[in-house]
Structures are given as C-alpha cells and as structure tokens.
Image: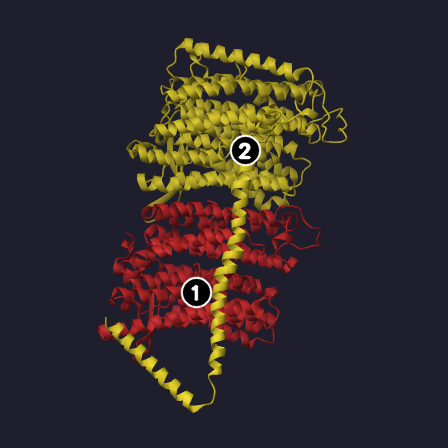
Chain colours: A red, B yellow
Amino acid sequence: MNSTPLLGIIVFLPLMGALGALVYRQNERACRLFALTVMLTDLVLVLSLFALNTSPQLAGNWLRVEDFSWMDSLGIRFTLALDGISLLLILLTTALGALAVLVSWREITDHVAAFHFFLLAMLTGILGVFLATDLFLFYLFWEIQAIPMFFLIGIWGHERRIYATVKFALFTISGSLVMLLALLSLHIIHARQTGETTFALLQLMHTSFSLPLELTLFGAFALAFAIKIPLIPLHTWLPDAHTEAPTAGSVILAGLLLKTGVYALLRFAFPLFPAAAQFFSPLLLVLGLTGMFYAGWIALAQEDLKRLVAYSSISHIGLIVVGLSVWNVTALSGSMIQMINHGITTSAMFILIGMLDERLHTRKLSELGGLWKIIPVWSGFFLFFTLASLGLPGLNNFVGEILILVGTFTDRPWAAVAGFIGLLWTVLYGLRMLRKSLWGNADPRPDIADLTNRELTILIPLCIGVLWLGLHPGPALEIIGTALAGLNSGKGLLTLAP
Amino acid sequence: MKPVLFLLISFPLLGALILALIGRHLSRRAVETIACTAVVAAFVLALTAFLLSGQKTQSLTLAQWFSAGSFQVDMDIYYDPLAAMMALMVTFVSSLVHIYSVAYMRREGGYIRYFCFLNLFVFAMLVIVTAGNLVFLYLGWETVGLCSYALIGFWYEKPDAANAGAKAFVVTRLGDVAFGVAIALCWINLGHLSVSGINDSAANLGSQAAGIIGFLLLLAAIGKSAQLPLAVWLPDAMAGPTPVSALIHAATMVTAGVYLLMRFFPVIQGSPIVMALIACVGVMTICFGALAALVQKDIKRILAYSTISQVGYMFLAVGAGDLAGSLFHLISHAFFKSLLFLAAGCVIHALHEEQNIFRMGGLRRKMPQLFWLFLAGTAALGAFPLTAGFFSKDRILLAVFLQPHAIYKVLWAIAAMAAVITPLYAFRLFFVVFFGQPHADRSRASAPAPVSHPSVPNLMTWVLWPLAVLSLFAGFLNLPANWAGNEWLAHYLAMVPGAAPELHASQEMESTTQLGSALITIVMVIFAWIFYGASIQPNECNDETFQKKLQSLFLNGFYLDRFYQTRIITPYRKTAEFLWHKVDAGWVDAALDQSARSFLTLAERLRLWTTGRVSQYVSMMVTGFTLILCSLTVAWWYLQI
C-alpha cells in the first residue's frame, strides 16, 4: 500500500549482506566491515521509520503495511505489517545485529565469511518474524531464523557444541513441525468455512472453532512458541545452547530469538484463538511464575557465568509471560517494554562475559574474584548491567517489572505478590555473582588489559539504552500503548482476564 | 521554590556523575573538592528552602517518568516541614562527614569510588526525603541501599566486608518486597501514588485496607531501619569505613524507615493494630539492641547495636502517634550518634585500626580534645539531663505513657526499663576507652605496643565540634513547657498530615518523669563508673555459668544470625543445588534427552525391518494404508465439527 517497500528492504537487506559477505571471503577485515555497514544501514532505515510515521493512520493502528501477491492460488501473500511493538523490536534487532558483528571482531577467526553469512541470514529471519502477518510467510521466517543458529553454535561454539546444537535443533524443529500442522489445519478450516483460501492473520482471526479444536490448535502454536521463549519445562536446551554458543550467538539468542516466542504468542496465538488463550492463561501464569522461581533458584548454584546468565534469562522471561497471561494494558505494556529491556541487559551481560573469556579464558566463578582490582572499567560495566537486571529503579528493568506486577495485581493479586517475592531470587543470585567475580581477592595474573575502544563502543550504546529506558521510557511506552490499543480493536481481547 | 528544590537534589547527583565519568582523570584534590562542594551546596540550598517555605507545603513535578494505561508515575517533589527538617539534617550531617572523609581517606586508594557513592547516597537520601510519589520514593529507597552495599563493601578484598555488603542488600530487599506490594495496593485501592493523594484519601481506605498497607510499609521500614526481626545486617555493616557508618548506618539511611512511617502516618493511623504493632517492634528492638550493646567489645559494634536500639525509640514514638517526638529523637540521635561514630573513627585511626575497647584505655590524657567530644556524645546517648537525648527520649516515653490503651502502659514500662540500660552501656564504653589502662587480650599472644603519641588529623576533630554542640543543645529545638520552652519543633510540624503538636500532659507530669529519668541516668552513670571506671575488667567468666551463657547470648545478638544461617540460608543453598542437579539436570533434561534417544532406538529398530522379503513389505504396506485411512477419517470427522 506504500510506494516504497521499505519494510521489505529492511527485512532482506541483511540477507543480501549475507550473500555479499561470501564475496569477501578472501579478506576477513573487508568482510567484517561489509557486514557492519549493512547492519548499520539497516539500523538507519529502521530509524527512518520513526521519522516517517509517528502516529498510526491505518485501521488496527498499523503504522505501515506492505502487501504483495505471491502464491495466490494457495492464498499465500507476501504481507509485512508494522505496528509500534514490531517497530521497537526491529529497532532492537538491527541494533543488536550490528553489535553482534562488532563483538565477533576478535573472537571469530575461522571461516569468517561463513560466520557472517549465517549471522546476517538469521537476522533476516528474525526481522521477518517480527513483521510478517501472513502466517505462511511467518512460518518461513520462523524456520529461517532457527537454522543459521544451528550452524553458529555447531561450528563456532565451545567444547560441547555438537550436543548443544543438536539439542537446540531437535527442540526447535519438533516445535515448528507441530505448529506447521496446526497452521495448515487452520488454513483448511478457514477455507471450508468461508470459501476463501488465505493465510492472512486478519482474515484467519474471523474463523470460528469448537472449543476442543481451538484448544488443540492453540496448544500446537503455543508449544512451538513456548519452546522458543522458553517456558519450563521446555527450557533445558537454552542453558546448553548459551554455554556453547559464541558471544554473538548468545547475544542473538538471548536478545532476539527468545523474544520471537513471546512476540508470536502476542501477535498470533492470542488473537487467533482468544477463547483458548483465556482457557490456557492460568497455565501460562503458573508456568511463568514457576519458571521465575525455579530458574532463579538454579541460577544461584551455577559456576559458569554464561550458564548463570542463561538461567537468569529464563527467570526474567517467566515474568514477561506472567504479564502476557494477565493481558491488561498495564501488564502487557510492562511485558513489551521488558522484552526490550531484557534484550539490552542480557545481551550486555553476555557481551561482557565474552570479553572476560577472551582475556582470562575462564568463565568459572570459582576461578574469578577481585576483578575490580584487575579490570576496573570492565567491572564497572558489569556492576552497572547486573544492577539493571536486578531491577534497580532508574535503570530499565525496573520499569517493566513494576508495570507487569502492578498490572498483574489488578487481576490476580496473589500472583503479583508471588512475583514481588520472586524479585528477591534475582537479587540473591545477582549479588552472589558480583561477590564471586568482582569482589574478594584477586589471583595474581599476567597483565590483563582493560576494555579497548572497540569494546567501549559496543557497551556505551547499551548503557545509554539502559538509562534512557530507565529514566525516560515515556515515548517507548506510548508507542507500545498505541499498538496495544490496535490489538484490542480485533476481538476485544483486553477483557480477557476474568 | 522549584529551582531551589530541583538543585537541592541534583547537586549531589551531579557530583556523583562527574566523579563516575571523569573522576579518573582528576587530581585527588579536585575529586575531594567536587564531592564536598556538591554536598555543602545542597546544605545551603536546604537551608534556603527551609527559610523560604516557612510552614507551607509545596508540591511540584520535576519530570514525567512513565505511564501505561491509567498507571502513571511522575518524579514529584513534596516539600513540607517534615521533609524540610529531614533535608536539613541529612545535608548537614553529610557535609560534615564528607569533610571528615577527606582526612580519613587521605591514605586510601579507591577514593573516587568512595566519594562517588557517598555523593550518590546523599542524592538518594534527598530523594527519599522530598519525594512526592511512592515510586519515586522507592527509587531513592533502593539507591540508598545500593550505596550502602557498595560502601560497606568498600574494602572488597576482605571477604567479611564483601559479604556484609551483600547481606545488608539482601536483608533490606526482603523488606522491599513489602514495599513493592504496598505500591501496587495503594494504586489499586486509591488510584494514585502521590504522597499527598495517598494521605488525603487515607481516611476513605477502611481499616482493613489501611491495616494491610500500613503493615507492608512497616515491613519495609523494619528492613531499612534494622529493626527486629531484620536487625541482623547492621552490626555486620560496620565492616565499612567509619564515616560511612556514621552517615549511612547511624544518622540517615537507617532512619529512612522511620521517615517512611511518618510520611504515610495518616494511612497507618487508620489501623490501631498496626500502630500497636509498630510500638511493639520498637520496644522489642530497644531491649534487643540495648542488651546486645551492653556486652560487645568492638567499639563500632557497640555503637551499631546502640543505633538499632535508638531507632527502636523512634518506632515506638510513631506507634504512640507522636510524630514530633519521633522526629525530635531522630534529629538528636543523628547528631550524637554521628558524633560518636566519627569520634570512634578518630580513636580507631589513632590506635592503628584497633577496635576492641578493652585494648584502648587511658585515652583521656593522650587525646584530651577527643575526650570532651566523646563525653558530649555519650552524655546525649545516655540521656544525661539537659542534653538533646534527654529531652527527646523523655518526650517519647511520656507520649507512650499518655496513650490510653493498656498495651501502651506495658510498652512504656518495658521501654523505661530499657532506658536504664542505655546510660550503662554508653558510659561503659566511655569509661573503658578513656580511663584505666589498656588490657591485653588473651586471645592474642603479644599485646600491641601502646601507641605513645596518638595523632589524628586536625580536620577530623574540628568537624566534630558542631556535632558536639548540637548533641548537647539540640534539646532547644523542642524544649518542653515546664522548661519555659515553646516546643518549637512540634508546632512547626503542625501542618504535617497526622501530626498532633500537643501531648496534653500536665506540667507536673512532665516534671515528674523528667526528674525520674534524670535520677536513673545519674545512678546508672555511677554504676558504670564503679564497674568500669577505676580498673578495667573485661568481665569474662570462664566457668559455664548462667551468667556466661547470658553474656554469650547478648554478645551474639540473641543468635538471630545463626538462626537465619541454619534455618534459611543453608536450606536455600541446598535447594538450589538440589533443583539444579536432581530436578533440572537429573529429571527434566534427562527425560527430554531420553525421549530423543528413544527416537534414535526406534529408528534403529525400523532399520531392522528392511529385510528384503516382499511378502513382509506387502503386509506392512497394507497396515500402513489402513492406518493412514483411519487417521484421515478421524481427522475428517474432527474437522467437520
């Protein structure tokens, strides 16, 4: 409907870059620079969206819709649509994508071109997931985002990479197969009811089901998304994947891939099957809360820093799912802003741990200690981002947490009380992590350099993001609020909770 | 007025930011100057605001913070007489502590981190004091906790210091869970989170809701103010630098809990049960702290337990509905306790980091100036007649006694008895340190060489004089009527929601209680002199007597720490290990791995079917077709519904 297919360009630019990276496979530096340029260009394009569209003019509060015919006989169209939530998420994607290229500058030295090929191809998949509203197209992107990760872990990972990557693949593929079946069934059912063959989200939303059928279909979709999120008890692939992945892989995994699961629940599973969503929302609430405690508890016992942050990630995501399951404006706004917050802080943690690993060749807490004395600047950043993830007011995570919990309190007070208590679990493992790494006595070590300028360039934007969203989240929340009102215009979803 | 209040809280923040960002490129002198200037400027601004505003209440919005749906949070300022007095006290004590720290820290590395967090602390404390919104207040509340954590663990190489910092953070966060729930409840029940809004509509809250919110606020206050049962973090917090103990863990942060209760007094007032509970917590903590202080040997631990006990008086006053009395004691305590801590810092410094009082002794002649300063602080702590502590403590006891309900009479009796112990431990400390001779500790083989010429930088003693004067004379802030006073503080606070200026006590009654407590104090000072004045006895009994057990009970803070360690912390750790190894790896993950493996086995089995016999293939094909047809039928039937 718009003359320039800007969204299409944004989605496919990384893929073009991925192919381009292969061209530079003789020259590593050129390859890195090229990938970085592509991602920065993409970032600028996303930023230009902010300038183009400030307030939605389209029905359903879409900021921009791009619709092209594709396989019309099958009802498959190439439809990308942008609302406030996807706008913020693609901003996060392109920003973290650029940072992922930067963090790999020294870490990745083998098969550099192939690495950047997979990295950028994966970003196209993620961007597509955040923008597609044709279900078939969405499914394609969903698969595209997963496959490169399989190679990233399997080729550039650490010691147990094969085990981790096979585990990741099995989980992901079984999830998406179930989803594919449900998606096709949905398509057929809709075709039978209305006579039109379509995969368009907005049309499929007008399908009516018997309750058991709706529950089955919702369950199939939710299973695929829950594996990605990951909700307990489907989370065990994540700690392994994180521990074995290269830093860039961890950044994309924690910052973006997990978000696609939550986003897909919000964008597809809930609006398509509102009755089933209402039926299952207590289960989601319980799983989210349990995950928050369970993973937070396990994080306390971890020795490997990456594993610790992976479990903390599961714990944080649990709270986001709680907000989603309650489904009122306050809690949903909290969950959405928390996705961005979590993307920033957890990526920053993984980046910092990667920098530490490059220097000390260990991530074991028992072998660390007294780092403040050795690398004070690194330690300052580590303290800062840990405090952000502990929910210190004034930093970003606090805003999301308080919105989720206050929103939850309106409908399910006891769940909110449990959530407030759960925040204590975060503090316990967070402080233990600081105690074992930054404080205490330093082992005598050979001279270790503190952060370089390249590393500061990576971390400072993340710091600004933390402070910006912690102190002035108003504009972001406004964008989210408008988008949520658009979601509401579908089937009156915002009255979901009893 | 807006610029004044804005600058008041932003000066210390600016100082902290400058030190954090470019402190590494500045000279030590520049760092010290920036830190001190920021805080002294804040004091000047607090004074300006106090003089400009009179008894008026100011509400203003500094900035929008965040909002979603109808939930809205702004960075508001609410400045009334209560906030004015607190801001004055906080900036005044902070200024002195900053100046003292320049001398105290002059040989330490890490001074940038120290001053940065100290400045940030002053900012956060001012946010607590002037916040006009519960969530904004929470920002200050958590940030002081962070600064406390970082400064207790200032000497992070020492495991004790690093652990103590984390302990303080966790224990206070325990109370903050309740704070969070209180925020949610206030918003659900009252529809807004502004201080004035909450207090104005507190009357419509109903006693049940008011009781729950009040109880949650009490829990938050208990954590921050180190009251029972969460008092355990404060004695350990003494691992931090002494000026930090003086500022954060005596004068300001630990009284933030009391301030929270005073700030939302109209809510608390709605529930008599919560009022009585606050008073009970106060009284129990008074006894706990006083008894523990009586037998400690470490000078800073004595003062820490004393702080716990004195903050208990402030809780008691709030529980008795006497805001003016609570604030009066809060202010006088801030003066005399920071004086005592800073003076103790001088002593420790002069004796090369010796903290055991029984190894000090006889400092009266070696450090005469400090002797007088310490005496002023001790007298005020011990409520010696006519000092600040005398008037403030007396007002609290009187207010409790005047409460009609019987429970307050009981509480009064216990508090009065505990008040007997205060001068005893205060003067025990004083006599042991400044009279007699140092006593070699048996635990150490060689006694340290006595320091012949203890020296303390002049700056460190100079800043104590204003505090000493205030410790002795701050009683004039609220001189009772029978001393021809006009109770200025109580009347100044009259406009604060929930404050009642008059105690409605007859002059005879006031005189009688004052006379009684004066007599008791003097008697106890004499007692202390008899026990500890002439000859030093580190009263230790070697036999397993009841006395020994009692002493050990007090010395270990009633074994509260051990209780938490064995009942909560160790089980928590073990559960973490259990969940990880047994449940997550051993059960959930193993089950998923197992199902993956069984697919593999299945595939292996399937491979066996490729036998090459045509008859078998045909039968398998038939079975297969049948299965497919059946499932298609089922699916068709299912989709029809």
Rendering coords of residue A175 (x, y %): 41, 68
Residue ID at (43%, 56%) = A339
- A255 left or right of B346 in image: left
Front one among A392 and A165 = A165
Q: Split into 4 quadrants, where in the image is the N terminus of chain A?
A: bottom left
Q: Which mark is residue B216?
A: none
Query: In the rendered image, which quarter is residue A307 located in?
Result: bottom right
Rendering coords of residue B507 (x, y %): 41, 10
Please name the residue that numbered disc 1 is placed on: A45
In whole angstroms, how far apart are the C-alphas of marks 1 and 2?
Answer: 49 Å
- Which is more foreground, mark 1 or mark 2? 2
Please name the residue that numbered disc 2 is placed on: B248
Residue ID at (30%, 76%) = A75
Q: Amino acid at mark 1?
A: Leu
Q: Is residue A74 above or below residue B147?
A: below
Residue B254 visible (yes or no):
yes
Q: Chain of mark 1?
A: A
Q: Is residue B381 above or below residue A324?
A: above
Rendering coords of residue A170 (x, y %): 47, 70
- B67 left or right of B287 in image: left
